[in-house]
Every structure is written in C-alpha cells, then in structure tokens.
Image: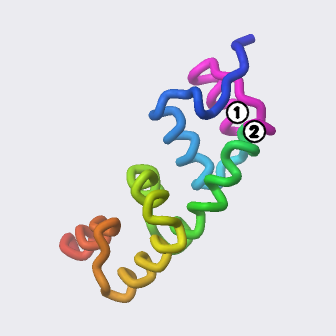
Amino acid sequence: MPPHAKLDTLPKAIKDEIIKRILSRESYDAIHNWLLEQHRIDISTMALNRSCKPIFDAFIELVDRGMPIEEVIKNRPKIEAIGIEEVKRLLIEKLTENPGSLFTYLDEQEANQ
C-alpha cells in the first residue's frame, strides 16, 4: 500500500487536477480512487474533504456563474489575492458588459462568434 499523502505536498499539476475534479463535483471517493490508481497516492476521502471543501466553497460560485474551471485554476492565485467577493463582483460586471482583466476568456469567446 502506498504511503499516505497530504494535499499540500503534492505536485502542482496533481493539485490542480484535484481542484478541477472537486469543482466538477466529482465525488471524494472517485478522486481518492483516481489518485490511488493513476498516481499511487493515498489520500483518504476524509482528508480530501477537509482539504478541498474550503476550496470548493470559495470557488464554486464563480464556476456556477459561468467562469470555466480551467480559468479558475489558472487564475487562482490572482483570485485569492484580489479576494473571492471582489472577483464575483467583477465577473457580474463583466457579464453585464463591463470588461475585467481576469475575464479575457469572455472577450475571446465573443470575438470568435
């Protein structure tokens, strides 16, 4: 059996994939199994829940408002620096046609249409 690991000790790519799966509402059991099967990393579902629930709670409203999960993950440090509530406000403004620097993906989508 592989040794137990903690989320903050994992490589960035694996942490980002875990966050992606959490924000996609994948179950902790499925994430645990994926880590074990693909990476031979054993993090209990309780540890995943304890580590990931604050991340889920902080970012899920952005996802629910239409921000792509990949953009949340890519911009997570910026979002945390600005503050979740401020980013929600900026996203709402952008969605009502006021541009914001974190939401260039929306501009690109509009330009491609």
Give the camera-side residue of 111 and 99. Answer: 99
Coordinates of residue 78 in the picture (x, y in percent): 40, 57
The correct choice, above or below, for 12 with respect to 55 in the image is above
- Residue 31 relative to residue 59: left or right: right
Q: Secondary structure at mark 1?
A: helix
Coordinates of residue 32 in the picture (x, y in percent): 70, 33
Q: Amino acid at mark 2?
A: Asp
The residue wearing badge 1 is: 32
Coordinates of residue 21 in the picture (x, y in percent): 58, 46
Residue, x 63% and y 31% (percent of image)? 34
Quick one: label 2, few (<14), some, or many (20+) residues within 10 Å?
Answer: some
Determine whether label 2 and label 1 are within 8 Å by CB.
yes
**Extreme residue in the top direction:** 1
Q: Which residues are magenta?
A: 29-47
Q: Secondary structure at mark 2?
A: helix
The correct choice, above or below, for 96 with respect to 22 in the image is below
The correct choice, above or below, for 72 with respect to 89 in the image is above
The residue wearing badge 2 is: 29
